[in-house]
Image (cartoon, grey):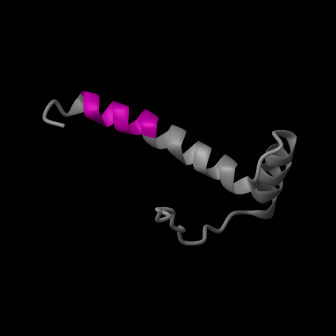
């Protein structure tokens, strides 16, 4: 079985933002990477749906 996961380029954020992310992840008993993936998925799902509604050929 092959692993279809990959990595993304590093993202620079302010320390306060990273601290918030780490604190939230800990409060959910999740890894920071899980929180980031979930946030990106929700963002893409929402914005892809919006763009599909605007372009009837998609």
The residue drawn where x is 46% and y is 65% is: 2
Between 7 and 10, the residue placed more toward the observer is: 7
| Magenta residues, start to end | 45-53
Between 31 and 20, the residue placed more toward the observer is: 31
Looking at the picture, how far across and down is residue 21, in whole percent?
77, 51
State the image quarter where residue 47 is shown: top left
Looking at the picture, how far across and down is residue 10, in whole percent?
60, 71
Identity of the residue furthest to the bottom in this view: 9
The residue drawn where x is 27% and y is 33% is: 52
Magenta stretch holds residue 46: yes
Identity of the residue furthest to the front in this view: 1
**Left or right: 34 in relation to 21:** left
Looking at the picture, how far across and down is residue 26, in whole percent?
86, 47
Quadrant of the image for the C terminus?
top left
The residue drawn where x is 81% and y is 39% is: 28
As displayed, is residue 55 above or below residue 3? above
Between 34 and 19, the residue placed more toward the observer is: 34
**Left or right: 32 in relation to 6:** right
Looking at the picture, how far across and down is residue 48, in whole percent?
36, 38
Number of labels in the image equals: 0
Magenta stretch holds residue 17: no
The residue drawn where x is 86% and y is 40% is: 27
Mainly helix, strand or loop, the magenta region?
A: helix
Identity of the residue furthest to the left in this view: 57
State the image quarter where residue 46 is shown: top left
């Amino acid at each position: 079985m092959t692993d279809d996961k990959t990595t993304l380029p590093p993202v620079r954020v302010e320390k306060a933002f990273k601290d918030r992310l780490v604190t939230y992840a800990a409060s959910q008993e999740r890894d920071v990477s899980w929180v980031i993936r979930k946030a990106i998925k929700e963002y893409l799902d929402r914005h892809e749906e919006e763009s599909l509604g605007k372009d009837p050929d998609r």
